Image (cartoon, coloured by chain):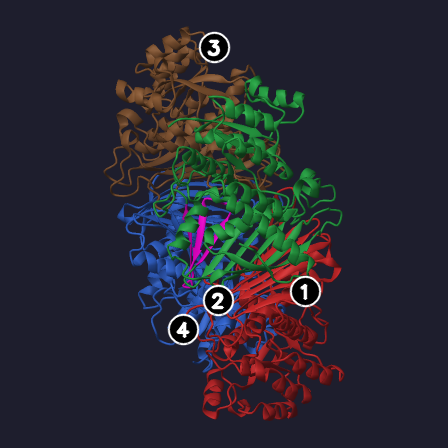
Chain colours: A green, B red, C blue, D brown
């Protein structure tokens, strides 16, 4: 299998998401990072490029130039990876798509639903698409959960409960950086930063569409400029109900993304902090923990049963799928532009409902 | 310590709650069951009385007569225990309170808030009160949780999440008996049957009052006559928010009552299915499981650490407190009439909000 | 069902085992405590009898007298319950059996294997037997485990691992009372106090016999007069191997009795601190937690699924079986005299091997 | 930081350990795989080299030649990674060390203790050393455990329990390949394949030395040519006792490596299948789960709290340390030749004791 040259925009060494993307790329063995626009500041950009072993000629400070130059090179990048603050996602993506370079972009897609829609109208109509980094859909047992639901293991789904809890913004001195600044992170706060992951997970696994929602959206730490905690009643297609709770001030929670589905025949649970296990419960009192890598599992994985896979391995699965896409194949589980827009629809519906005392609001599809 | 003679109304041998109450009574060693109105049918009542070793003269078929006769006996019962279907709770309680006999009554108190209020107005003003069987407040670690919250272990509480899940009404042939008949169980369905437990638990442990709520109330199994699943947004005093989810159709759930509180300083969790453990989490990544009976625990218990206590032991703690009350002492943790009324306020507010598309409704205090 | 009058020897109120036995008796609803020899000291005995509501005429200070008088009474006790220190078990039991009164006795049976054997020879030949309080065999899910093994769920058993860990003797000031005095507790220390429970559990559930063992027996807290920690290699009938580890100085352990069986087809695990769950694992990566009370379980229990049963409920199951025995039925799961002798064989074999550098020693059957 | 060129001997694509090493190398970002002797067969070797993107000129079929040629190249490899069957470990290592090329080698080091000792005498005296892949010591929370022990969190250690359970050799048709052939895997079977990991873990975390052992060594599946299950009593320096149980036929176990230490002040537990958590228990009934990445943890890690790290990340930590070593620094936690020899001492002592009915045998240091 060939190796695809890629470039990164944002994500200088030491940034959380930049490092994560690079490690996930490396795990796949399918990509080579050869270009970057790691900072707008020349000194920082050069230093970052050097640390990553980039050719100085391919260390940019202007992504427009990067898109133009790379598109022109015979050995130009085959994929632009966008890990900037949220406000820059779509401007950067536009530049690369315009230049004919495929894009993998962090979520949330945009600051507003309008931006996301305009972007989509502009590019989808031209046949463009892009990959959106809903990381958690890359876990083997999340995909296995989706498969079990699809195969009817749960029967008709009645109730979908998803929650995503963190506490890093919970103390008095928490500094969320650009994430807490509505100009760079968006007005959604925790809804955009982690709520979109939870929302995507619920729809991805259940195969159902959330039609309307009713939200309570709060700033539980009053000095925060954007929501840090929200709980949202959900109504799905096929009469399923549910709830999504997201918080970045839930003291004692690390990265507690947890999905539970309750169907007529069984309940199903997955916790991101123990990602190798899927829990299926039935009304006869049996609760079965299914281990990734075991012969009872249909979804392939990197490592055998009992050898833990983690967050980077999930991320690598998204990149492996992306390589497969670049190879010319289909990768139906990979989140795409439409899924990114869906996240914006969720954020906007939740914010709207939250300011209308929890009125039921359509999550426009 | 003396032993108190008690009588039971409802709860013939083989009924779930009747047997549970009798075992809990026995565990305390403080009561002697000497009278009963176990059925309205003479044959059944006599047979039940015999099986329980009651004096035939104290085996009644009419609770009014039982109240009158027992009140007149020099060795009459010191406590009437009411374990009838919900519609009979208050009529029976009234008869015994009128006769001057203290009462311990199952929840929910009544079929409607109005009934509960009228009853309260009638008796509270005369100085009467009664014990209401919010069983779960009898668990040692629930009381310990309340103590930790009161002592400031969590700091200011931000978010309260309580859920109570069962699945015994989840299958196609489930038969809820009188519980699913609005005439005998009330219109609240799962809200009254188990939701009141969850609501009491949240207020009991947190020490906060729920002021308003917004409810989604459903019959997920369409043929059910009363709600079988509801999720309710809560707003508490002191700006805390929260959620209460109750379901009797959550496939794979046995009796999954779970409370989580998130405060500024720590999070706290208790699960009824592992009742001997309290889980306290802090933002430094430590999650501490505190074992009942250990020297780190301030609440006394029956058995030493590592020797599991269960549901009956929790129930026995309510009865031990009741004996203590009969002895003439105070038992401040014991749920009383006001707590029973509170449950009705919760049911009514939830039903009202549920029929108004989740409008925020006051939980009148 | 009738109620059986019983008497207790040892176990004044406030003693751990005395209270436990009384609560377990009460839970069954099948016994009435009417006589006692709760202390050798008249004042203490009378006070204890009064606290328990005994007739002063049936409050004894001499068990020989108690046996004689109760045997002569038309309403004499139907069962003598022996909860004295270990050295008194057999002398007391002999007096009651001689008087024709059935006995339920605490473990370990005796101070030495010789004592146990002589006792057995003396009484078994006369058709006498007695119940021995291997409490943990009273848990519903222990009995269910035995049933699953017997039904072939595990296939041929390869390896049996049992451990019983406590830490109450682990600190510098621990005072084990008569348990640490070889004259009253026996030379076995932890082997007799808790090791016999573990040994019985392994044989009870597996249905196999331990044939030989090799022991490391230690006093890890040097000032202890008897062993406080021992680990023992086991070889069973049918070529199964295994290990038994017992410790009362395993810091951080409450009452951690845990059994694991590994068979050709599945592994099985039970933990006393979460007694309502049985865990079955298979090589396809499925680990199933089976809940007591669920329809998947064949063993009956007091409470429905999700309503925790604990230590007292297990104890009550032994007493319910004992009542059933007194009723004239068979109770094949109840531990009897032969099981008590088996415990002594285990203690003696382990002590012998321990002093012979772990030589393999026969556990004489 | 520069990138080190490395070569691999054994481990063609598709082999478990070859892929694992390559992914771990990639995760560090510190190495570049540039040469390989992936098979002795020219066709296979060339195809494997091509799949890995190696220069055909550096795709060897003879490791002796590889060592010679790479040592002579100005851009020759800085590290030889040996992932052959066990019998080839030392011959290959000798060739590279002779050529002056540092080595990282899989365990167990050799087929016999004698081989390991001769090798060590030959190379250590010349100042050579090498890295041995005791993978599990690369987990962050294993290192944190070692740190806590060293800092006195547990007090004096009394008992060390380690077990390593798998089931992939448990069924009737299991085929262990070269691992079950004593000529290629050694006579130790499970002792070498996984027991050495467990033994290293126990000494690595506790800081104690195992002085003598007494083993039961079995072939529970009779047709196996080498041991598949062994349980070993351990005596450590400082009067600690313990046990090591290893099995590859423990049905229902994936890769269940679990270490427990019991000290005077606390107990500590780590499970490989949930590697991000360290569990510390104290006699007051508190059991604290410490999360990797939390501020309570002193050992650095790749990912923040709540973002699971797994087996590859542990392996990558060994490689990051190796790069650090090549950089000229010290890496004191990295397992070296002496640790590899220690593994052989363990295997030999266990085999010897096992054939002598569990006689206590010195683990020569």
Q: What stretch is highlighted in magenta?
A: A267-291
C144 or D17: nearer the eye? D17
Q: Nearer the viewer, mark 1 or mark 2?
A: 2
Residue B173's disc is: 4
Q: Are marks 1 and 2 on the same chain?
A: yes
Alpha-carbon distance for marks 3 and 1? Answer: 70 Å
> What residue sits right under mark 3 in the picture?
D127
Relative depth, front residue between B168 and A95: A95
- Crowding at mark 1 (Cα within 10 Å: few <14, some 14-19, many 20+): some
What's the residue at 23%, 38% (across, down)? Answer: D223
Near-viewer residue (B363 or C237):
B363
SS at circle 2: loop
Q: Dot 3, how many residues are within 10 Å of its Cα: few (below 14), some (14-19), or many (20+)?
A: few
Q: Do the residues labelled 2 and 3 touch (CB within 8 Å)?
A: no
Q: In which quarter of the image is residue A330?
A: top left
Which is the main secondary structure of the residues drawn in magenta? strand
Eyeballing the image, is B306 above or below C320? above
Mark 3, mark 1: which one is toward the viewer?
Answer: 1
Sequence-first disc among 4 and 2: 4
Where in the figure is residue B200, as x and y percent of width and height? 64, 67
Residue pointed to by mark 1:
B203
Residue B317 position, x and y percent, is: 61, 68
**Which residue bears the numbered disc 2?**
B249
Q: Mark 3 lies on which chain?
A: D
* Numbered marks: total: 4
Question: Element type at marker 4?
Answer: loop
Q: Which quarter of the figure has residue D292?
A: top right
Separation (CA) of disc 1 from disc 4: 35 Å
Q: In the rendering, which numbered label is found on residue B95?
A: none
């Amino acid at each position: 299998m060939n190796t695809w040259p890629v470039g990164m925009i944002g994500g200088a060494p030491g940034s959380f998401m930049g490092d994560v993307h690079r490690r996930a790329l490396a795990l796949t063995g399918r990509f080579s990072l050869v270009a970057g626009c790691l900072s707008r500041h020349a000194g920082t950009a050069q230093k970052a490029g050097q640390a990553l072993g980039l050719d100085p000629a391919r260390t940019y400070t202007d992504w427009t130039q990067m898109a133009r130059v790379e598109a022109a090179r015979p050995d130009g990048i085959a994929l632009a990876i966008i890990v900037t603050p949220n406000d820059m996602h779509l401007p950067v993506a536009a530049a690369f798509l315009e230049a004919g370079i495929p894009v993998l972009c962090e979520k949330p897609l945009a600051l507003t639903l309008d931006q996301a829609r305009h972007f989509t109208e502009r590019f989808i109509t031209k046949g463009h698409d892009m990959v959106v980094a809903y990381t958690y859909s890359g876990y083997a047992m999340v995909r296995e959960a989706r498969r079990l639901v699809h195969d009817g293991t749960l029967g008709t789904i009645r109730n979908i409960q998803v929650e995503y809890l963190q506490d890093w913004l919970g103390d008095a001195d928490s500094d969320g950086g650009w994430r807490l600044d509505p100009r760079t992170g968006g007005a959604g706060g925790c809804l955009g930063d982690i709520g979109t992951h939870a929302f995507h997970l619920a729809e991805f696994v259940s195969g159902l569409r959330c039609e309307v929602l009713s939200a309570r959206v709060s700033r539980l730490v009053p000095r925060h400029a954007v929501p840090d905690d929200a709980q949202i009643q959900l109504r799905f297609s096929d009469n399923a109900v549910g709830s999504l709770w997201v918080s970045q001030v839930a003291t004692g929670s690390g990265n507690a993304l947890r999905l539970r589905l309750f169907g007529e025949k069984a309940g199903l649970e997955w916790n991101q902090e123990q990602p190798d296990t899927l829990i299926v419960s039935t009304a006869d009192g049996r609760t079965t923990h299914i281990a990734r890598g075991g012969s009872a599992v249909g979804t392939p994985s990197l490592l055998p049963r009992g050898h833990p896979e983690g967050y980077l391995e999930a991320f690598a699965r998204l990149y492996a799928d992306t390589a497969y896409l670049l190879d010319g194949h289909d990768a139906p589980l990979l989140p795409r532009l439409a899924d990114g827009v869906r996240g914006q629809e969720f954020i906007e519906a939740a914010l709207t409902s939250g300011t209308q005392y929890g009125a039921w609001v359509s999550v426009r599809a």
